[in-house]
Amino acid sequence: MNMLEVNGLRVSYGGIQAVRGISFHVSEGEMVALIGANGAGKSSTLRALARLLEPAGGNVRYRGKELLQVPPHCLVTEGIALVPEGRGVFPRMTTLENLYMGAYARNDKTAVARDLEHVLGLFPRLKERAQQVAGTLSGGEQQMLAIGRALMSKPRLLLLDEPSMGLAPIMVQKIFEVIRTVASEGMTILLIEQNAKLALEVSQRGYVMESGEITVTDESSRLLADPKVRAAYLGE
Ligand SMILES: Nc1ncnc2c1ncn2[C@@H]1O[C@H](COP(=O)(O)OP(=O)(O)O)[C@@H](O)[C@H]1O
Ligand SMILES: [Mg+2]
């Protein structure tokens, strides 16, 4: 079953069309990568799905529902969680407070406590830094926290915007290990990355975005082997 079905999505900023009628889908339990150069329209796509901006056109079906009819503030309870580019943790709150913020819309206390243990198990570093204010965490730790906070909302669909951006290779490796684990536990994930190699290595299918349009789509393993994709996005 398709968890997410995007048809003809358009995003404009004033007169500039950043997303030009793209269509794609994500099946339940699948990890799908959206790759493309800087400025291709990847973040705009995600921001439109998370309803941080109103799309200029198109429709989005989410679990059989017309997503664009759902009020933006209801997306969290619908099970959609965005980890935005730049992470967006609350800098003056502690790690633990940030994680609890992720669960603000939930009232199942026992399950929240269990999920907190699970997140701290995924990211032992966050457990060590539980009482530290988030603004003083390293970039990699903040990315872990942003992902952990999203998981605390108990999402059905996780939207990740460039989790590797600006991080040291060792941190990128750690974070992607967790993304793999979360995916293997059955989470549905739409992953945006400029690091195409990494994204295609962890995902099942991928879409290539260029200048606001999807130009290529295939299984990730085939995209990884595609000479054109390799030349354009894998630095070969
Ligand atoms: N807030 C904004 N106002 C005006 N133009 C924007 C804004 N955000 C993004 N854009 C433009 O939209 C296009 C797509 O940007 P973006 O979605 O951020 O691409 P990507 O995430 O693939 O790097 C770019 O040309 C960018 O300059
Ligand atoms: Mg972006």
Image (spheres, grey):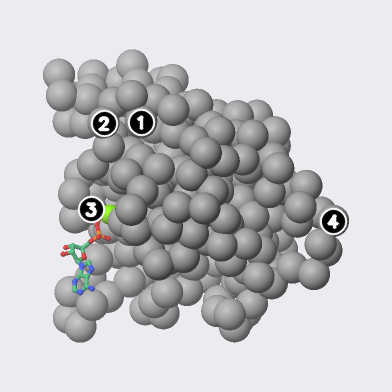
Q: How crowded is mark 3: few (under 14 residues within 10 Å), some or many (20 or more)?
A: many
**Residue nearer the viewer, 26 or 185:** 185
Tag nearer the camera, 4 or 1: 4
Q: Which amino acid does label 3 sit on?
A: Ala
Q: What residue type is labelled 1?
A: Val
For the C terminus, give its image quadrant: top left
Q: Mark 4 points at which residue?
A: 110
Tag nearer the camera, 3 or 1: 1
Q: Label 3's element?
A: loop
Tag nearer the camera, 2 or 3: 2
Q: Mark 2 points at which residue?
A: 168
Pointer 3 residue Cβ closer than 8 Å to ligand 1: yes
Apparent side of residue 72 relative to residue 172 in the rendered image (left or right): right
Q: Residue shown at 19%/55% (left/top)? A: 39
Distance of label 4 from label 1 (alpha carbons): 32 Å
Q: Which amino acid does label 2 sit on?
A: Ala
Give the quadrant of residue 78: bottom right
